[in-house]
Image (tube, rainbow, N blue to C red):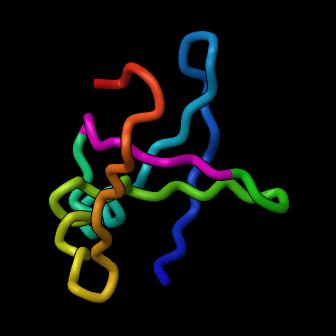
Amino acid sequence: MQTLQTNVKKWGNSLAIRIPNAIVENLKLNDNTPLDIKVSKNKIILSKKEELSHLLGKINDDNLHTDDFSTPRGKEW
């Protein structure tokens, strides 16, 4: 696990952190990379959002399910 230190800085009406270049390069981040932010037990956890193609690549015969199309119960169709 890579651990580096940074400081919180004022940015307009908000606060921001700078992500050190070593982490940017390691995670292949750019200025538009979507991140998930989680707060847990006095920690801020930033995670790079998984791309749809990566998520779809995890589908296999063991976790694939069929769609359940029941008979209509009203005026759905």
Q: Nearer the viewer, residue 57 or 12?
A: 57
Q: Judge whether 25 appears above or below 69 on screen.
A: below
Q: Seen from this angle, which residue lies furthest right? A: 41
- The x and y percentages for residue 57 are 17, 72
Q: Quadrant of residue 44?
A: bottom right
- Check the picture and name the quadrant holding the C terminus: top left
Q: Residue at x 28, y 75 (%)?
A: 64
Q: Residue at x 24, y 55 (%)?
A: 51
Q: Residue at x 53, y 74 (%)?
A: 3
Q: Judge whether 71 appears above or below 57 on screen.
A: above
- The x and y percentages for residue 69 are 32, 50
Q: Seen from this angle, which residue lies furthest top? A: 13
Q: Judge whether 73 appears above or below 6 on screen.
A: above
Give the total number of marks visible in the rendering: 0
Q: Residue at x 32, y 71 (%)?
A: 65
Residue interval drawn in magenta: 31-38
- The x and y percentages for residue 9 are 60, 32
Q: Nearer the viewer, residue 14 or 60?
A: 60
Q: Is residue 57 left or right of residue 38?
A: left
- The x and y percentages for residue 74 are 45, 25
Q: Does the segment drawn in magenta span residue 10?
A: no
Q: Quadrant of residue 50?
A: bottom left
Q: Is residue 71 left or right of residue 16?
A: left
Q: Judge whether 77 appears above or below 32 on screen.
A: above
